[in-house]
Image: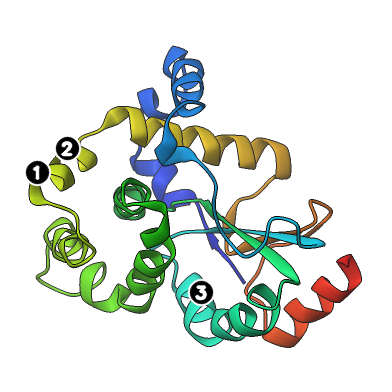
Amino acid sequence: MSVTRRTLLATATPALLFGPQLVAGTARAATDPRMSVRAAGNPAAKVHVEEWFSLTCTHCARFASEVFPEIRTKLIDSGKVYYIFRDFPLDQIALMAAMVARTLPPERYEPFVLSLLSSQDRWAFARDVNPQDELQKMAALAGMPADLFQKTVADDTLRQAIMDEENRAQALYKIEGTPTFRFNDKVQIGQEMTYDAFAQQVASAA
């Protein structure tokens, strides 16, 4: 089962989704280092796996905490898999979090993302909590100054660039929910996976 993109589409303004900004944002993203690939492992690995995920997706959080550590150890660190993280925010909170994650130095991206996924109940879903304030606290722990955080969450260029990539993935691969995985750009699975199922797909793609 995966979570759909319905919430983001319902709350995003038209300017974020359509019109000249889409083309302009794509052009800017091509030269924006914040939009460069975020990945783990050896790019020369035989199997490349892409995961489209949302930082407010509970299925993504469970996969990150229960399955990904074994994938990291047995498949990524061993050189079998090059793992590419793809943003697919399902709502405005996830979009803001993705913006912050991409503004951090690349080497801090994965630890920060995994930290956000493991603590969704505290920063994204807790009652009487402002998600932006909680996100700023976590960003500060990752080394982001307060002024850079405020500049980041107000950056419409970065927001549009992430939305552009999400729209592109949706158009090319018909991705509607998270998590979604693609193995060597051929086999696509749009649901949470166990380690055994994931490893089997890796073996078939090798």
Q: CA distance from mark 3 to mark 1?
A: 32 Å
Residue under label 1: 147
Verify CB contact (< 8 Å) between mark 2 and mark 1.
Answer: yes
Question: Is label 3 in a helix, a strand or a loop?
Answer: helix
Q: Residues within 10 Å of mark 1 (few under 14, many from 20)?
A: few
Q: Residue at x 72, y 68 (%)?
A: 81
Amino acid identity at mark 2? Lys
Q: Please, which colouring scheme is shown?
A: rainbow
Q: Nearer the viewer, mark 2 or mark 3?
A: 2
* Residue 133 found in image quarter: bottom left
Q: Is residue 27 above or below residue 10?
A: above
Q: CA distance from mark 2 to mark 1?
A: 6 Å
What percent of the width, then of the height, locates residue 113?
39, 65
Q: Is residue 15 above or below residue 131?
A: above
What percent of the width, then of the height, locates residue 182?
73, 58
What percent of the width, then of the height, locates residue 200?
83, 79
Q: Residues within 10 Å of mark 3 (few under 14, many from 20)?
A: many
Locate residue 149 relative to residue 184 in the image: left or right: left
The numbered mark at residue 117 is none
Q: Which quadrant would the C terminus be assigned to in this image?
A: bottom right
Amino acid identity at mark 1? Asp
Q: CA distance from mark 2 to mark 3?
A: 30 Å
Question: Is label 1 in a helix, a strand or a loop?
Answer: helix
Residue under label 2: 151
Q: Is residue 185 above or below residue 79?
A: above
Number of callouts in the render?
3
Amino acid identity at mark 3? His
Question: Is label 2 in a helix, a strand or a loop?
Answer: helix
Locate residue 184 relative to residue 99 in the image: left or right: right
Residue under label 3: 59
Which of the two residues, 124 or 199, is positioned nearer the viewer here?
A: 199
Q: Residue at x 35, y 34 (%)?
A: 158
